[in-house]
Amino acid sequence: MNNSRLQYRTFTAADIPLVAELYVASFNAPPWNDAWTVETASRRLSQMLQRDSAYGLLAYDEAGLCGLVVGDEEQFYYGPQFQIREFCVDNSRRGQGLGTAMYQELEQRLKQRGIVEIVLYTMRHPAAEGFYQRQGFAEAADLVFMNKKV
């Protein structure tokens, strides 16, 4: 794949029906093996976009929509931080540099917006962790993600 042919545009609510299908296909496949439906994915994506500081990019090539990255900004004492909430690419295009190209575009745009740090949660799996490590991310030694089912 020639990632120089990628085109990007800002993710908006009008894009949710198309993006929800990509989201479901991506996250219902390995390594996540989730059980999203178009309805639940649409609701999640809509909730993300409703945040004041939400920002997302869609990647397109000659075949159409091929990737999504979305998150939001929060102010910290040292400057604004961006949390990637979701990042996915078309399953048939994994391993071709698409995710790397998308991440690089996102980082460049976030720098222009004054973001000083990018954070995220990801699955403990070589495919997920490895991708972010290759982008320069490291595990935060002083933080732990915790949850409780209620």
Image: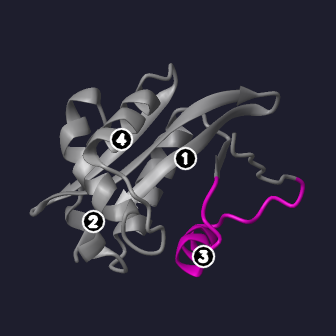
Real-space CA distance between mark 2 and mark 3, rounded to the nearest whole angstrom? 19 Å
Q: Residue 82: give x, y in percent of width and height.
A: 60, 39
- Using the image, tell me which numbered label, if any, was put on residue 84: 1
* Magenta region: 121-142
Which amino acid, by three-letter code, is at mark 4? Thr
Q: Residue 35: give x, y in percent of width and height.
A: 39, 58
- Using the image, tell me which numbered label, if any, was put on residue 125: 3
Real-space CA distance between mark 3 and mark 1, rounded to the nearest whole angstrom? 17 Å
Real-space CA distance between mark 2 and mark 1, rounded to the nearest whole angstrom? 18 Å
Q: Residue 145: give x, y in percent of width and height.
A: 76, 52
Residue drawn at 37 percent across, 52 percent down: 36
Which amino acid, by three-letter code, is at mark 1? Ile
Which amino acid, by three-letter code, is at mark 2? Asp
Q: Earlier in the sequence, mark 2 or mark 4?
A: 4
Q: Which SS class for mark 3?
A: loop
Q: Which SS class for mark 1?
A: strand
Which amino acid, by three-letter code, is at mark 3? His
Q: Magenta span has 136? A: yes
- Using the image, tell me which numbered label, if any, was put on residue 52: none
- Front one among 31 and 52: 31
Residue drawn at 26 percent across, 46 percent down: 38
